Amino acid sequence: MSEHELEVLLMGYVDGELDEADRRRVEEALENDPSLQRELEEMRRLNDLTASLGIDDKSDQELKAFWGSVYNRMERRIGWMLLLAGVLGLTALGLFLFLESDATHWSVKVLTAVMGLGALVLLWSVWRERMLLLPHDRYSKEIHR
Amino acid sequence: MADDSREFIEDRQAIEACQNGDRDAFEPIVRRYAARATGVARSILRDSALAEDAAQEAFVRAFRAIGRFDTKEPFYPWFYRILKNVCLTKLKRKRVTVFSIDAEDAPPLEAPPRDPSSAASHKELRATIQDAMDTLSDAHREILHLAHFEHLSYKEIAACLGIPVGTVMSRLWAARKKLKTVLGPRLQIGE
């Protein structure tokens, strides 16, 4: 066993992660190796130093507020999607009827069409940016796992 | 990865209820993992408000995808990957490139000491360790966070990161070695 392998096993020993056979191997190696004993001591001290640094539990009040926000988001997402679909549908229909109408002067129609085109360009730009980012996002598929 | 612990069984029951359309059944899951999720998000984003937002967003995404979750697997590693994804997306938007626990914006400590002098030294120790962690690579900081702050086992870390246990051991060993080297002069350990 190389020195590196032994040190990695030693770390597993300190963390209580080794099986019986590996634990015995480390203990045997420790018996006759003062430098390994020193390494063991250093690893234990490092673990002791960080042992008190953890993540605090949230209070019941905080958890209640947190869950409330999550719940509201879950609920509101559906509402927003329906609202957005309605707004987009109505806008498209309104625009079509407006451009079709004979009662409006052609210059108003042209300017309205330009405004609509601008909105489409913006939407296209945002969508393209997202599509360019996604292939480089190594975690994008994690939600599907 | 099968797990018969009480936590695993409770999670599975709650998730199965969620999969059957019970939205309220998600509450115990959120309550169990909210603090850890916020801690992980804060360690990535270095911003408390953004971290809270990211953690909540990750729970919403997890709930939306819960139908595809395999209840034979533990929940946290699956959720961790979603959370990390949300945080990285937020980081991209912020154009922040660091993965770290900021000394000033670190997770609150477990049971802060009541004695002021002890509290001061505790704060100092935290700042020292976090400064040292700031000098490490993203991968090393991440694995140290999971091992030292979340106290996960090697198997759990492997599941969170999607790597074999052997890789967890070698990466964690390298990360600790570097941390020890950085901390050594200040805390009289390491080389």
Image (cartoon, rainbow, N blue to C red):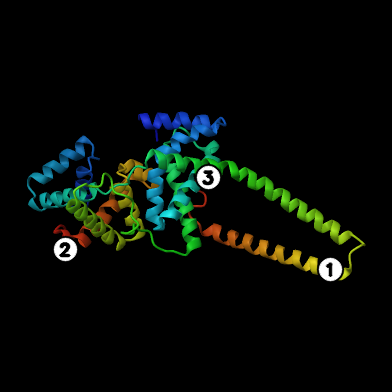
Q: Position of residue A82 (x, y in %)?
A: 68, 45
**At label 2, which amino acid type do we have?**
Pro
For marks 3 and 2, give the CA distance. 44 Å
User: Horizontal placement of B101 versus A116: left or right?
Assistant: left
- Secondary structure under tag 2 reads helix
Q: Is residue A108 above or below residue A6?
A: below
> Which chain is mark 2 on?
B
Residue at image location 50% in from the left, 48% down from the top: B57
For marks 1 and 2, give the CA distance. 75 Å
Asked if labels 3 and 1 touch by Cβ distance under 8 angstroms, the answer is: no
User: Horizontal placement of B28 versus A6: left or right?
Assistant: right
Q: Position of residue A13 (x, y in %)?
A: 20, 43
**As drawn, which residue projects farthest toward the bottom?**
A107
Residue at image location 41% in from the left, 40% down from the top: A61
Q: Give whichever of A23, B189 is nearer the camera.
A: B189
Give the number of marks: 3
Residue A108: mark in rendering = 1
Residue B185: mark in rendering = 2
